[in-house]
């Protein structure tokens, strides 16, 4: 089954430089990201490179770019998602694992394998937050991913899984976000995130957040975060090669990544990820990113 990265538009390169982020010596939050992997051009994007674990940079976890210079919808997605997570806090270590857009591999099997690898880790080096910024079918659950998620959540009571709600503008939840509904005993630790548009005026007194025009919506979406024209690290083709750049991109992927970053910030400050999630939910459905505000 094909996994769709939670991006709703094509990225747009902008003239802006993102300075490298350097974690502090006391960084103790671990974040797992299963996505398209990390782009490497003689190393990863300088914005995120210092925050990646070593396994993120082995060949099987790298985002392999096409030779023709035509980027696909998954290319650069993992790098951008990690940049959004780190926008909330650089005091984390990112464990990036390629589970999307891997040639010759079934996407469901790859994602399930990556989740199982997190489960097998010693608790001292297991991520406290796992980010899944992709979505798939709405009619048939991916059983392998479901079993792997259940095993992970059973093994790690302090862990939270963050998923993107999808970009089909429908009230039918896709998987893996729909596992919030299906994995009943862990539904308080598996959060689905929708995207809001911060160019629309809104007050917390209003019942409904200003949904982005592409974002899925259903009653199981616990949190919403900015997902329209957010800024992050990207890559572009130039002179028969690739170079790093900065772009704006829209999608529930990046809303989910913002929530992951906020959770990681709480973990870094000494809180349990489920407690941080519960606190966020108690203050209303919208989580603002560090670099956004209502216009």
Image: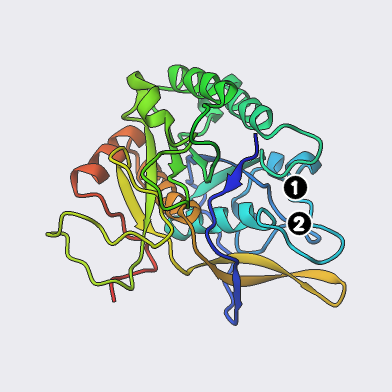
Measured along the vertical axis of the image, is residue 199 above or below residue 22? below
The quadrant in which the N terminus is found is top right
> Residue 119: x percent and y percent?
56, 22
Binning the other alpha carbons within 10 Å of mark 2 as few (below 14), some (14 to 19) or many (20 upward) gives many
| Position of 213 relative to 111 (above/below) | below
For marks 1 and 2, the one nearer the N-term is 2
Residue at horizontal 31 percent and vertical 37 percent from the top = 220
Q: Could you say where residue 225 lies in the image, as x and y percent from the top left?
A: 36, 56
Residue 183 in view here? yes
Side (left or right) of 204 relative to 295: left
Q: In the rendered view of the protein, which quadrant contains the C terminus?
A: bottom left
What's the residue at 55%, 30% (across, down)?
125
Side of 62 where 224 appears, left or right? left
Secondary element at tag 1: loop
> Between 272 and 186, which is closer to the camera in this rendering?
186
Residues tagged 1 and 2 counted as in contact (Cβ below 8 A): yes
Residue 6 is marked as: none
Q: Quadrant of residue 103?
A: top right
Q: Circle 1 is placed at which residue position?
A: 62
Q: Identify the disc placed on residue 40.
A: 2
Q: Residue furthest left?
A: 205
The residue under the point 36% across, 30% down is 189
Number of callouts = 2
The crowd level at tag 1 (other Cα within 10 Å; few <14, some 14-19, many 20+) is: many
Instruction: Note whether residue 90 is visible.
Output: no
Residue nearest the viewer, comparing 287 with 176: 176
Q: What is the secondary structure assignment of the residue under circle 2?
A: loop
* Residue 114 x %, y %: 64, 30
Quarter of the figure with residue 19? bottom right
Residue ID at (34%, 27%): 187
The residues tagged by marks 1 and 2 sit, at their Cα atoms, a distance apart of 7 Å
């Amino acid at each position: 089954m094909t996994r769709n990265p939670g991006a709703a538009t094509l990225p747009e390169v902008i003239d802006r430089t993102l300075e490298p982020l350097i974690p502090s010596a006391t960084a103790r939050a671990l974040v797992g990201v299963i996505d398209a992997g990390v782009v490497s051009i003689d190393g990863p994007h300088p914005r995120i490179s210092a925050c990646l674990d070593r396994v993120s940079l082995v060949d099987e976890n790298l985002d392999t770019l096409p030779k023709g210079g035509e980027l696909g919808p998954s290319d650069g997605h993992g790098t951008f998602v990690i940049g959004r997570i780190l926008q909330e806090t650089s005091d984390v270590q990112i464990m990036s694992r390629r589970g999307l857009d891997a040639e010759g591999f079934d996407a469901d099997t790859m994602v399930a394998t990556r989740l199982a690898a997190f489960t097998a880790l010693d608790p001292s080096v297991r991520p406290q937050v796992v980010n899944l910024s992709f979505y798939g079918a709405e009619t048939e659950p991916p059983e392998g991913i479901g079993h792997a998620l259940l095993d992970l959540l059973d093994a790690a009571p302090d862990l939270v899984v963050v998923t993107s709600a999808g970009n089909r503008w429908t009230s039918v939840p896709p998987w893996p976000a729909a596992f919030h509904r299906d994995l009943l005993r862990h539904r308080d630790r598996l959060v689905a995130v929708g995207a809001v548009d911060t160019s629309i005026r809104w007050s917390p007194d209003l019942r409904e957040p200003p949904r982005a025009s592409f974002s899925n919506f259903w009653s199981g979406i616990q949190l919403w975060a900015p997902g329209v024209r957010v800024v992050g690290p990207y890559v572009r083709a130039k002179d028969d090669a690739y170079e790093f750049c900065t772009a704006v991109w829209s999608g529930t992927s990046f809303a989910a990544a913002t929530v992951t970053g906020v959770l990681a910030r709480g973990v870094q400050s000494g809180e349990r990820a489920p407690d941080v999630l519960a606190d966020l939910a108690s203050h209303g459905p919208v989580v603002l990113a560090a670099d956004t505000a209502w216009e």
